[in-house]
Amino acid sequence: MLYDRNGILDEPRLRDLAAAAGEVVVVTPRLETLTALGSGIRQAGVVPDDAPPLAPGCPLPDALAAGEISGSQGFVYDGGVSCYRPAGSAAGLLAVSGDGQLTVLGSTVVLGNEQLDERGHAALALRTLGKSPDLVWYLPSLEDVAASGSGQTLDELAPEWVRFLGPWLLVVALAAIAWRGRRLGPLVFEPLPVVVKAVETAEGRARMYHDAHAVDQARDNLRAGILVRLAARLRPGPGASADTVIEAAARLLGRPAADIRDLLNHHPGSESRLVAWAQELDNLEKEVNSR
């Protein structure tokens, strides 16, 4: 069983591994791994997140005995005999080569402890990995790269002149610090008053809302602002609720309170609708102020 998540093994090591083993089961392999093994099986995408449990859908005895499995976080592969195919896909979560020597399993959930007791995960894992009396569980690490002799250190990869570059850059940096420090003198901290106009603050916040597409936040601010201004104009009393302000505005304008309530409680669904709604609120405020 080979799980080379980081693609550590190169093509010669993979070919030696396949030649030494009678059967090989690879879990979520990369394209390079499948190409090196030369099985004719290839990557074909992922299982959709909203996919239901996958049925075997193939004649393989191991899959039929295991039954349904979860396709969560799974990959599908095409070639050979494929099982556990999502709806509308010809590729499956489990693929077996024509000679039966290579099995590709596109999910670690089937072998993980978290869901091992669910559906047919345990049965599929035991039947896939338990065909031989001996099982080698191989998880390559960086030590395998060093053992192959293909890894090189930074000193070996860097050209000869790089070793002189570090000290030279250090000397240049120290000279630049001394030059700039003598030229500018010591730092002086001086508090400076900053005055920002209210209109600049409003415009800056509006730009941030626009860039973030924060329609709901802008709507809440506009609604709160007009309620505060209407309350100051109509004077319904301290602690007045939004409904009290709406009813006072309706009495002043001679309009149904439901119309004004629907206008203030409206939820724009787009930025263009938000602009139009803001203009409607402005017209309402102007109408109240003119009475």
Image: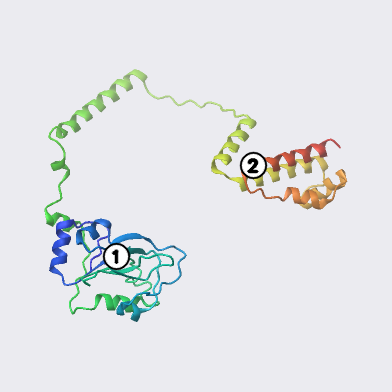
Measured as percent of width and height from the top left, residue 192 is found at: 53, 26
Q: Residue at x 34, y 60 (%)?
A: 44
Examine the image and state in which quarter residue 18 appears: bottom left
Which badge, 1 or 2, comes first in the chain's sequence?
1
Q: Local crowd at mark 2 within 10 Å, few (<14), some, or many (≥20)?
A: few
User: Which is more toward the observer, 104 or 201?
Assistant: 104
Q: Quadrant of the C terminus?
A: top right
Left or right relative to 244: residue 95: left
Q: Which residue is mark 1?
A: 79
Examine the image and state in which quarter residue 46 appears: bottom left
One can see residue 25 in this view: yes
Q: Residue at x 66, y 46 (%)?
A: 219
The amino acid pointed to by label 2 is: Ser
Left or right relative to 259: residue 204: left
Q: Are marks 1 and 2 in contact (CB under 8 Å)?
A: no
One can see residue 240 in this view: no
Q: Quadrant of the N terminus?
A: bottom left
Above or below — where is 66 with respect to 142?
below
Could you tell me how far apart the alpha carbons at marks 1 and 2 are, in whole angstroms?
Answer: 51 Å
Q: Which residue is mark 2?
A: 272
